[in-house]
Image (tube, rainbow, N blue to C red):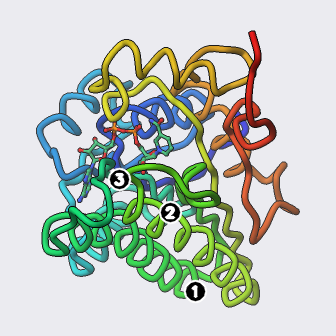
Amino acid sequence: MRLAGKVALITGGASGIGLATVKKFIAEGAKVAVADIDATRAQEAVDTLPEGSAVAVGVNVSVFEEVEAAVQSTVDAFGKLDVIFNNAGIAGGKPLLDHDPAVDYHPMIRVDQDGVYYGILAAGRQFKKQGTGGVIISTSSIYGEQAAELAFSYGAAKAAVISFTRSAAYELAEYGVRAVAITPGRVGTPIINQFSDELKSLFASEQLRNKMTEPEEIANVVAFLASDEANVINGTVVHVDDGYSAFKQRFD
Ligand code: NAD
């Protein structure tokens, strides 16, 4: 119960890494606002959780006023905010020279980059107002630190998440706020399950255990990072990629 008494807002909470984190946080004693653009699935998730432990919040993270409203809904439901997990995201991409910026760049930036900026800003203001400190955890990606095929826009957004995290840690330290980015590798969620079996098996081979990471394994790390036990992890990147970023090639 290392999150007993904590209140968290988790974006992208209706699926994948976000949903696994919602469940883990509740198991560790937190109250959680399950925030997602798919409000129906967020409510369905809440309906499976212990009564009073979670509320569903519909939010499009690419609209600042909606993110502010999600923070307010969390405070209205549970009295305060201690942790924001900026995790909502979309993936995909085309070769650069095939880009239509209106389709292949701006929409991705609005969700994966602006959405995290808005979460940091809205939660940061709430933490300052409360005077209680707080924790900001944001989901970057292995692509935030290296180039990859078909990831021109996604990689830019995920790199920005790392930069935001460093700057937020610096700017908000005086209010007792920590900021940490995580970089998942290949995680078995709907975002990745859309790909062919061949591609999924390639993805698995890129990690040292030769398999996809389970969303619950990411959630375990996020719960630790949100807890007071992680109080010296600040302004940095925690690689949750099963060695992806540490090695280049297998020969077997
Ligand atoms: P997922 O598709 O299961 O979950 C993403 C959730 O975000 C969905 O519930 C979706 O409805 C929600 N969402 C999308 N756009 C939104 C918006 N504008 N506002 C609010 N909610 C929105 O995928 P996931 O794998 O759990 O992804 C979670 C995060 O992890 C994403 O930021 C993704 O980029 C990142 N990530 C995933 C992997 C992976 O291998 N699965 C690897 C690295 C990073």
Up/down of 101 relative to 138, above or below: below
Using residue 107 as the reference point, say whether residue 218 is left or right of it: right
Work out which residue is located at the far right of the displayed protein and give it. 232
Residue placed under numbered mark 1 in the picture: 128
Q: Is mark 3 within 8 Å of ligand 1?
A: yes
Q: Does label 3 or label 2 sit earlier along the sequence? A: 3
Q: CA distance from mark 1 to mark 2?
A: 26 Å
The mark closer to the camera, 1 or 2, is: 2
Residue under the point 55% across and 37% down = 25
Q: Position of residue 178 (x, y in %)?
A: 71, 70
Q: Nearer the viewer, residue 21 or 139?
A: 139
Image disc number at residue 89? 3
Where is ligand 1, by quadrant?
top left
Image quarter of the C terminus: top right
- Single out the mark in the foreground, 3 or 1: 3
Total label count? 3
**Label 2 amino acid?**
Lys
The residue under label 3 is which amino acid type? Gly
